[in-house]
Image: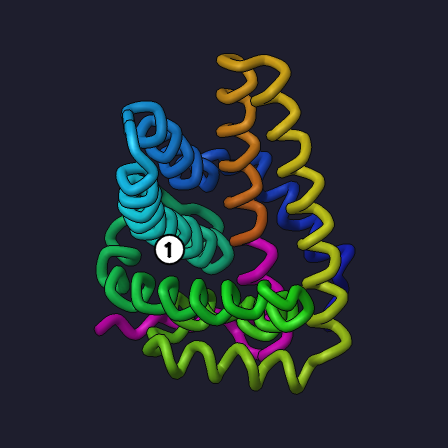
């Protein structure tokens, strides 16, 4: 039975006992900060090129980090324990899927956000795309279709989940930004830690909600 309060509470309690889930997002955030601090440009063309390169590298790092976190969350929900090695091993086997999916979602959501509401709608119907890959080893197109169909079949619960997670994400992002601006060095460290915690929490909640909405037990992932 889908109970959002229980899912959120379970995710929070699980994260408190398994800080390892925050490590991939923390590392990704640190790399992003380092990349940005090392770039020195003198012209608009160089700035544009630097932004493109950094954004692409960050995309690869973040999609891999998200995959590692989801893989660890999956093992944690299945066995009650997990390790960073397991997450890396599983995510490595799906790296191509994650990268292609990230690019597709970035284009779809990015174009949609130009009109605001279409972008939010895209984010909503595609929120189970990555869990679909981790849980069932689906290809990018299959994962996108699976996410859409699952949300269409469970629209009310899915919309409530999306709204709550979006609110939590925005709140944490605002707090992180405040720390980074008010306390330049220490604040950035706090922001990175908060990003990591949010990454682990979202992975736990999305995977748990995914399995409940599908009405299926956690199964072995079919790796390609």
Q: Taking the image as drawn, is residue 127 in sight?
A: yes
Which quarter of the rendering shows the C terminus?
bottom left
Residue 77 x %, y %: 51, 56
Let me know if residue 194 is in the magenta part: no
Q: Residue at x 54, y 62 (%)?
A: 207
Q: Nearer the viewer, residue 156 or 60?
A: 60
Can you say which quadrant of the picture contains the N terminus? Answer: bottom right
Extent of the magenta region: 204-224
61 over 18 or under it: above or below: below
Q: Going 62% across and 21% down the picture, which residue do you hit?
A: 179
| Mark 1 element type | helix
Where on the picture, by quarter, is residue 40? top left
Q: Position of residue 185 (x, y in %)?
A: 49, 13
Residue 121, placed above or below residue 201? below
Place residue 104 in its image quadrant.
Answer: bottom left
Q: Nearer the viewer, residue 109 or 42?
A: 42
């Amino acid at each position: 039975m889908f109970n959002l309060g229980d899912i959120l509470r379970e995710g929070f309690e699980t994260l408190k006992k398994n800080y390892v889930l925050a490590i991939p997002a923390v590392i990704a955030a640190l790399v992003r900060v380092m990349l940005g601090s090392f770039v020195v440009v003198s012209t608009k063309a160089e700035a544009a090129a630097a932004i493109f390169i950094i954004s692409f590298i960050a995309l690869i790092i973040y999609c891999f980090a998200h995959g590692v976190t989801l893989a660890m969350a999956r093992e944690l929900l299945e066995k009650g324990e997990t390790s960073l090695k397991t997450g890396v091993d599983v995510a490595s086997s799906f790296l191509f899927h994650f990268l292609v999916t990230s690019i597709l979602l970035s284009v779809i959501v990015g174009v949609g956000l130009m009109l605001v509401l279409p972008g939010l709608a895209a984010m909503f119907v595609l929120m189970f795309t990555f869990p679909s890959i981790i849980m069932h080893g689906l290809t990018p197109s299959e994962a996108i279709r699976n996410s859409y169909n699952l949300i269409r079949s469970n629209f009310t619960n899915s919309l409530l989940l999306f709204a709550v997670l979006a609110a939590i994400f925005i709140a944490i992002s605002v707090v992180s930004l405040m720390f980074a601006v008010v306390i330049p060095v220490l604040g950035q460290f706090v922001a990175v830690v908060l990003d990591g915690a949010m990454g682990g929490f979202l992975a736990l909640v999305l995977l748990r909600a995914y399995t409940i909405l599908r009405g299926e037990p956690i199964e072995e992932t079919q790796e390609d």
